[in-house]
Image (tube, rainbow, N blue to C red):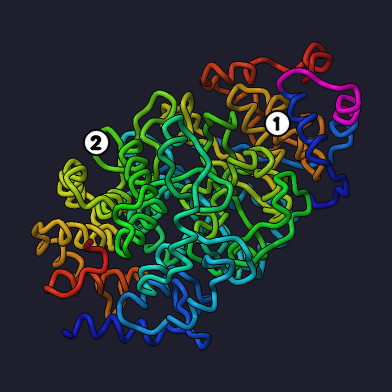
Amino acid sequence: MDERTNGGLKFLRAAQNADGGWPYVPGGASSPEPTCYATMAGLDGVRWLKARVHGDAITLDGDNEPHWTTSLAVIALRGERRLINWLLTCEGHKLTPQDEARPGWPWATDTYSWVEPTSYALLALKLHGGKNHPRVTKGEQFLLDRRCADGGWNYGDPKTLSVAPPSFVPTTALAALALQNADAAPALTFLDAEIKKRPSVLSLALTVLCFNAFGMPAAALMESLQQRQRTDGSWQGQVHLTALAILAREASRGGNNVFRL
Amino acid sequence: MSSGSDARLSRRRFLGLAAATAGGIGAAALIEHWLMRNRQPATGVTIRRAASYSAPLERLIREGLQNHPRALERARGGRVLLKPNLIEYNDARRVNTHPSVVQAAVDAFRAVGAREVIVAEGPGHQRDTELLLDESGLGEALRSEKAKFVDLNLDSIHPVALPSNYTRLGRMFFPATALGADLIVSLPKLKTHHWAGVTLSLKNMFGVVPGVKYGWPKNVLHWRGIHESIVDIAVALKPGFAIVDGIEGMEGDGPLFGETVNAGVLIMGENLTAVDATATRVMGLSPERVAYLNVMLAHGGTMNEGRIRQFGETVASVRREFRVLEQFAFLKQPPGWRDFVRGL
């Protein structure tokens, strides 16, 4: 492990709360998403995450509704069966006629399905034995239904009234990772062009992981990501971004890519 | 906004009042609405002209604040949270509160003695806040001000019981930074909205709802009703001041895809309903026809022009005709006795 990764891990260790979880920003309350990413980066958030499982899904402290990070917890906990079973039964409300046959996953209970939670759910299920499950096939179709005209994805609305909104880099990288097949080709073209114009830590880290999963070169993006590391070892002073940057570094250096199918 | 009203409306009555804004009304809702419209607390709204973003905005805001002693008192020695509208970045369209207005508000609240001024937002569509701050220019403006920015989507969150509960959620999670502020200042853009009609200081409060709980987009707010959610959030958090960036507004297919209108105004006040009603009039639209503004009358809001003391410019002197989508053509119709009978 090199100095940059060590610096990032040092930041993460210092940010861990006494309860064993991680906040988004040091000093805040522990939350599932940063804890999942810190765990994926090799630190120990397993006990904290397992203690947040209620009714077969992750819940927030003080809440009893299933949380969208259940998918990320499947990945962080390397295939927790009851969480997988919950994901297989979870569906968002139907926003379009296509959603009836090809539902995605929602952010919150009793709402529509969107691109990012659907991408997380597909990654979790495909990484842990569900690659050929009919629910996965429907979820992939949902993503294709929600693709924007420019080949990528925004949050999940390819047409607002008469306007075709543009795609975003992070959601496009996540959806392409969730597909990891030839259907993602237009998204890779979009990412290649867009990431140079509008780089950020989140966009760079996810695009590096995406390009790595597709066997595409990403050295320049990795260099740009490394330059954004702060002197305290973090990226943007945020736990989930620092963990994602570490995951991107490890993948680009020939190590494990947590999202490669 | 005043929190003095104890009036509570059931969801059924909410819907009755909301329907009253568009047509079709029951006698009970009509009478209740009449009573609410005539019992509105007196308040003031300041309108200042600013032809461009290079105008002396800090002075305009600081002078405007002097007209609103309750907000001023809460700001002095307190923690002030400035909540701009930072939703997406679009090269071609003015969708966000201009960084110069945010910068001027930071300076103005510091100048009147705020202990701390924090700028905070939880963008609703795009979770890459670093990118939004960079692309919009707000990040650079805040760095030059040495002002702290909090991403409300990622803040620690706490459940809060909803006093009005039109959404029937019972409670909603809000960010600790918002809950800990002595004064929340809404800094919206003057825009039309393709679902709500207009988006101003009350609708701008959607950005306080944390993505970590509700996602990107915060779809639960739409699912439970935009108008219902606007009121529930405002009643729960009680934002105490608003500064509407109407220097460049947006008409037509707002809040993202409309066209720029050079309206050249800043609109300020401590009763957010009154500020939004005034801003709606400046846009050439009828606030009496906006559902959530009507419902805010049950929660200390003021819409009646006779109850709003106007500081600075008059509405008539700065009024522009904002274009609206066809489905909101009814907002162009002035309220009158026929509306009252027909359903306001």
Foreground pick, A185 / B141: A185
**Residue that badge 1 annotates:** B291
Q: Main secondary structure of the magenta part?
A: helix
Residue at the spot of label 2 = A150
Q: Chain of mark 2?
A: A
Q: Is residue A224 left or right of residue B342?
A: left
Q: How many marks?
A: 2
Amino acid bearing label 2 = Asp
The residue tagged with tag 2: helix, strand or loop?
A: loop
Q: Is residue B45 above or below residue A121?
A: above
Residue ID at (46%, 45%): A113
Query: Dot 2, how many residues are within 10 Å of its Cα: few (below 14), some (14-19), or many (20+)?
Result: some
Q: Is residue B36 magenta?
A: no
Image coordinates of residue A107 in percent, x first then y, are 49, 53
Where residue A6 sits in the image (x, y, percent)?
24, 85
With B324 as the anchor, is A79 left or right in this view? left
Q: Nearer the viewer, residue A4 or B312?
A: A4
Residue A238 visible in this rendered orientation of the protein: no
Please tell me in which quadrant of the rendered image residue A156 appears: top left
Q: Image quadrant of residue A190?
A: top left
Q: CA distance from mark 1 to mark 2?
A: 37 Å
Q: Which residues are magenta?
A: B22-34
Decide whether residue B24 is among the magenta residues: yes
Residue B144, located in which quarter of the rendered image? bottom left
- Frontmost of labels 1 and 2 is 2
Q: Determine whether A190 is above or below B114 in the image.
A: above
A114 versus A258 height, above or below: above
Question: Residue A257's spot in the image, x, y percent?
Answer: 21, 68
* Mark 1, secondary structure of its residue: helix
